Structure formats: structure tokens, C-alpha cells
Amino acid sequence: MKKINIFLFTAIVFYLGFIGARAFFSGYPFSLICYNCKSCDSICVIGIDPQGFMAASVADDPDIYIYVTNYRIYAGEAEKLDPDMIIQCNDKKIKVSAALNEGLISRDTEIITYKMKAKDAAKVCIECAACERVCPVKLPILDVIKGLKNPGREKSL
Amino acid sequence: MTVSGVVALIIFFGTILASLKGWISQRLFPMQVALLIASLLIVIIGFALGERANPSVIITGTFLHPITATIAGFILAGALKSAGAFEAASAWIRKLQNSYLGVPFAVIVLMNIPTLLAMPCGRVWVSPLIPVALALSFDIAAKTGDRKMPVIIVSGLVINAAASCGPSLIGGIGLIGEGMGRYPSGSFSDHMQFAIMFMTAFAMIFSKYIYSETVSERMFDVESSEEVKDMSEHGTFSLLLFVTVIVATIIIKPAIPIQAILLCTTLFIMIIAKLGLDDLMRGIILHPLTAMISGFIAAGVLSMFGGFDVLVYLLGFISEHTPLGYVGVSVILIYIPILLPLPCGRIIAVSLIPGVLMFGEHIAQMAAIPRIQEVMIVSFILAGAASCGPSPLGGIGSIGEGRLRLKKSTGMFLSLSVFLAVPVAAFSVSAIGLSSESFSRGFLLEAVITGVVTGMITSYITTKKAFHPGGIAGGLVTSLLMLVL
Amino acid sequence: MTPNRYINYFLIIVLITLVIYFGRKVYREIFPGDYPMVTPTAESKFIFGENEIIVKLSATTKNGNIIVYTYGPDGNFYGMLKPIKDLSITIRKGDNADFMVQVYGREIGETSFMKKMDRYIRKVGMYDLLIEAVEKKWNYGVQNCLYPICTRCTDGCKSVVSTSNLPLVMSVMDNGEIKPVFRKGRCPRCGKCIIWCPSGVIQKEKQPWEK
């Protein structure tokens, strides 16, 4: 039993190192500094949670879902972008593909998003840099957004 | 709502409960191991049920900030200890004790330092302040004969530090609520600070009158017989540097991570006091760190399989189909962080704030009182921020328990003090409202009442005299300073 | 420990604090370049229907979004960010304003955003407000500048020009649009507003030979 415990404790310590390594491989090691305070979230008018970009960098995964709670987009375009994107429809949070299949909306309906992939959120970001302005540690969030927008850069994320 | 989410939630709750109740032997499976095995079980069942899951969610659910803040705090504490800063602090506090203001003044100021100079993670303060609190408490115990004093003072300090990340304006949990709820920046801070002063006082009362365990005789003898060392030059300087750096950080709010500031301070102390790496390592305690990380992993797995979504769904279902209704469920929702105490309040805050906003709006519409939503979010954030105090998964409380060598968990009465302090914050918000402006008549009145009441409680517990001028003065100084800082 | 040593240590601490404080200040970066120029918004035609308003545009924008604005009964500026599809925008009943800007003549006051996360703090129906604006002859229209959502140009300007009297200010136009206005004499021509403007509204001023 002792050996199992030692193994799992060591695994915990390695996990911490693994996260650090992932952040370095993503090319944005500064994302490790993020306070997760969500100051940036309050300032984004289209409702993007920019901390999600930092999380995407730490995980080195542009496909994680982040909040984008106030972006208007046509359902057809949303489906094209990501059928699993979560939208707000009649006070419900539902996948855009499911909403289309159930006939709640048509492809020409303008919908408001709720959660989308970090790489898609970067595409809809208007780059106003309000998030950078309010960040208590002044993280260059826009650099990550630009990296996610740029397909070449995206590969390394 | 998915089946895997329900299973994940049951396993997660089951593991925590079994570990707390001792159904899972801590000798055989420490909490960290139990949580990792539970996470593994959730993953296996989730995949068996055909769930598609993204492992990156676990990584994104691991908040590095409290982990790194803890490490930086431990390292700095090690440096301060080796440089003799705690001896210097103890000597100053002894001087303060012998002054006209006396013991209550020293106790109330010391215990409220974490909230007064609120850091983004309370662990930054706990490590350096516990040795000072211990020295003070053993001193008082020797004079008054109250052997519970170390538990009382350390518990007060621990819950104060745990909740202090709530009102912190430099990246605290309060900012998450303000951010996600779109409230003015810093508007939660004062309400939470005063409630935390009450929380600290409640923790003192409960540790004195409810908690049965005292510090072991052996530890008592060792600490009491320790000779009073002279203030060393390096110790005084290190202490002065540490306090100045923290105060400057609070006032200037530089765009530098607090961890980096603490490490630079450590480096400076190392050079001045000629310390080596071994001296720094002395301060590091691995248990809370590993417990915190395993807690994050478990919460990440829970989130990956929709455990939190199930929780919100269940609350919605209960509110619509049981006599509890929306009001009853909202009260439960506010207290979920202490019912499910995770190593960092950020996990639960981020996961459940959308639910709190939804419930808050619903009740605000029902009662036609828009302020209800503000009351709910501030109360929830305070409960969330303080929840790392009683958390058995590597919460701040476990640092205190470890230092005092206590066998019985302090979680129960720390939770109780959070439970009673949350309505104080709720009442404060409902009476004054949310505003970034600290110097209103309402806040000044609240500061005076909080200062006097908590001062009297501290005086009574430490000297058996409720109207000790030192306690009241200490309470007033602390509460008024909270408006300024 | 002698008092002199205390003073020395204290001075070291003060020095470190001052270095940190002044280290935060952004350096002044000025170099001669081109004057900025604000591009006009595309022409728009509002077609009012029973349940929706369709706005036909003569051109799209850089990021595919545009602000639809109208003035309200309180004289303030209400707006929402809308996606452009096939050079048109549709405003339906139930579309709420994203923000409100207080307006005093040409000057602008405080901005308030109407949404917290996924729910509205205050609901102002843009369809109804636009219908009222037509009836009462208040200003309404579309604007390509994303103010108040974006304030990159003023932020850029502030990072270069240290005085409070900036060469770039947001001002209310005759048609009610809010756009940046430049005072050439004061502009250091650093180009920051041109580079930082994400919607491409601020561009390099064309020289006579480039026109």
C-alpha cells in the first residue's frame, strides 16, 4: 500500500511539472501567472471570458470551451464554426446543432452564444484590448488571441 | 444532465464524506490518494458510459495561482524564520502586550492582518503569521492559564486568512464575482472585510466553547520553555522589509505577480541575512500542496463529466418541485462552498456563479427587490473564499491543524463561523448596496459597529473583560483601516 | 542595531518602492509619421417592417460587425453590436441594447453596459427605440467605430502623450455617431492609434499624391 501511496504522491508532483511544461510548449508561459480573477470578464462587451484564453494556453489546447455570453451570430455560421457550440435559446443553453435539429431556430436566425471553443472565441474577438487594460498583472492576452487566430500559430497551441 | 455527471457527483461527495468520517482509513489511503483513486474511478465509469471527454478540462480546472502563492509563501516564511523575523515580531508584540492597550489589541490586530492587507491567496499570510500567533498565544496562555489560547488565536487567524482572498483587490476571488456579475470593481470588498472580522470573532468563540481539543502538553512545554531570544538585526530588518513590501503592494498595486514580489523579497532577505537554500526549504510543507493539487484534479474530473451541471440542475429541480422553493434552494446554493469545501474557493466560484446569478435574478423578480441578486452573489463569494479554511482537501485550516499538532479536525467549527458570518455580509449589502466608494456614512457606521463588537468579543475571550480599551481600540483601528486600504 | 543602520535600511526600501512605482510608467515614444484619418461609415438604408428592421449597407466592415445606434428619450446614445450578413443587418423585436453612453452636446459622459454575463441588467428594446427615434426625429444609424466597446485609439494615445489634453478625443458627430476626432497640432504622429485600431476606422491620412 505504501508503494501505491508514494507513486500517487509523486504523480501529483509530476502533474504540477507537467502543467508548467504544457504552458511552455504552448509558447505562452506567461499564462501560468494568471490570477483567475476574471477582472477581464467584466469588461468584455461581447461577453468573452479572456481567462479562458489563458487556460487554453496552459492546457496547450485551443479546443477547450470558454464563455462568450454576448456575441450575436447567425445560426448557420455558428454551426459551420462548431456544431457543438453552446448557444442561448429561449432561456436554455443548448448546442447549436441540437437547436437546429429540434427546429427551435433556423440557419438564418441570429442567435446569442454562450460557450465556444477558445480558437473560435479568438476569431470573434474584436481585439479592443480592454481585458489587457484591466488585468492586475498586465498579461499580454492579445498575443494569445492573435496566436489562436493565426492558423500557423494555432498548431503550436 | 448526464448519468456520468450524477455518478461523478456521487463518487466525489462519497469520497470526501468517507475520508472525513474515517470510513476510509487515513493511514491506508490519505486524502490525496483517495481523491486520485476516486478521480480514476469517475474517468473509468465515464468512459464506460460512452462519454466523450476532454482531458484538458482537468488542466484548466487546476488553478495554479493558489498553488504558486502557497509555495512562495512557504519559501518566504522559511527565510523569515531563519533570519529571525518571527523573534523580532514576537518581541514587538510582547512590547505591545505590556503596553496600555494590552493583549486584546495585539490579538485583534494580528488576526485581522490577512484581511487588512488582503493578498490574492490567504496562504501568503498564513505561513509567516502562524509562528507569530503561536508565540503570542503561548505567552497569553502562560499568563492566563487558558490552555486553549493557541487553538483560539490560530483558528481566528486561519479563517481570517482563508476568507481574505475574497476582498483582495489584487486578484482575489471577489473579483471573479464582480467580473462575472458585472458589478463595479472593488464593490464587494468592504462588505466582505467587515463580515470576515465577525467570522474571525465567531471562530474564536467556537474554538473556545465548542472545540474540545487543546494543544498537547508536550508541545506546550516545549514552546513555553523556549527562551526569549533577542531581536537580531537581520530579523528586524527582514520583518520591516516584508511588511513594507506588502503594504507597498497593496497601495501601488504593481503589475507584478505577488509570487514574484514574494520571491524577490526572499532573495533580498537571503542576501542580507546570508541564508542558504536549506533555510528556505524549512518552511515548505508538502501536505497542503499535494492535497490542493489532488483536490483540483478531482474537481477537474467532476467538471469534465458535468458534475457541476448536475448540481445546478438538481438545485433547479428541487426549487421547482419541493416546498423549499427558490428561496430555500438559494440559501443552500450560497452555502454550497462550505458544504463542499474544496482547497480553493475559485473552483466552486467559477463553476457555480452562473447558477447563483440565475437564482438571484429569479428571486429578485419574484420579490421585486433587485438588490437580492447582489446580496446573493456577495454571500456566495464570501462563503466560497472562506471555504478553503475548513477544507480537508489541503485547505488553509490544515496548515493550522498541522502546526498545532491537532488530531481532531477544526473544519466543523470553522464552517460554523463562516455560516454565521455570511448573513453579516448579506445584511451589509442589503442595507448599504454595492459601491466602490468606501467613505460613505453607511460604511463608516458599519466600521464602527464591527470594530466595537469584534473588539469586545476579543477582549472577553482573551482577558475575560468585554470592555477592555485595548480590544475596542484595536477593533476600531482595524475596521477603519479596512475602509482605507 | 544602531539608528543609522535603520535609516539606511529604510532608505533602501524606499528606493526599491520608488523604482517599482516609476518602472510602471510607460515610456514616451514619439516619431514623425503620418497623421491619422477617420474613415466614414458605410452608407445605410433603414427599412422598417412590422416585426423587424432591415438595414442595407453599402459596404461591410473589417470584422463583420457594426454598431447600430439610436438616441433615447433621455438624450443618451444606445447601441448594440450586430453581425453583417450579405451587406445587411436585421434588428428584431426582442433585440436589446448592449450599452448606453451619456451624451452632453458634443461631449460624452459615462458609459454603462447593459449585460452581466448571460443576462441583462436593464433591457432596452432597440426595435421599439428605433421606431420611436424615427417618429420623434432623434438621431439613429450605424457606425463603424466600435466605441464605447473599444477604446484602443484613446488608450494608445494616452500611452504616448502624457498630458491630459489628448490630441485624440471621442466626440459626437452631427448625425449622432461617436467617433474619434484629431487635433493635428497636438498629434505626435506616432501611429499608435492607426496600428491599434482593430476595426480599421483610423487609417493613415492619404497624401495628395496618393489620392
Image (cartoon, grey):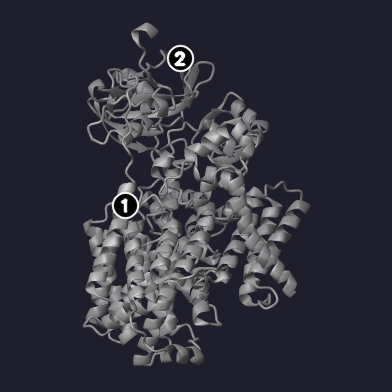
- Residue shown at the point (58%, 55%) measured from the top left: B62
The local secondary structure at tag 1 comes to: helix
Q: Split into 4 quadrants, where in the image is the C terminus of chain A? A: top right
Residue under pointer 2: C57
In the drawing, does residue C173 fall left or right of residue C83?
A: left
- Residue shown at the point (48%, 20%) measured from the top left: C89
Residue C105 x, y percent position in the rendering? 22, 25
Residue B415 x, y percent position in the rendering? 48, 71
Q: Chain of mark 2?
A: C
Query: Residue B130 is drawn in which quadrant?
Result: bottom left
The local secondary structure at tag 2 comes to: strand
Q: Split into 4 quadrants, where in the image is the N terminus of chain A? A: bottom right
- Whether residue C131 appears in this view of the structure is yes
Amino acid beneath label 1: Val
Nearest to the observer: residue B267 or residue B256: B267
Nearest to the observer: residue C91 or residue C151: C151
Nearest to the observer: residue B156 or residue C91: B156
Mark 2 or 1, which is nearer the eye?
A: 1
Amino acid beneath label 2: Leu
| Label 1: how many Cα within 10 Å (few below 14, some 14–19, many 20+) | few
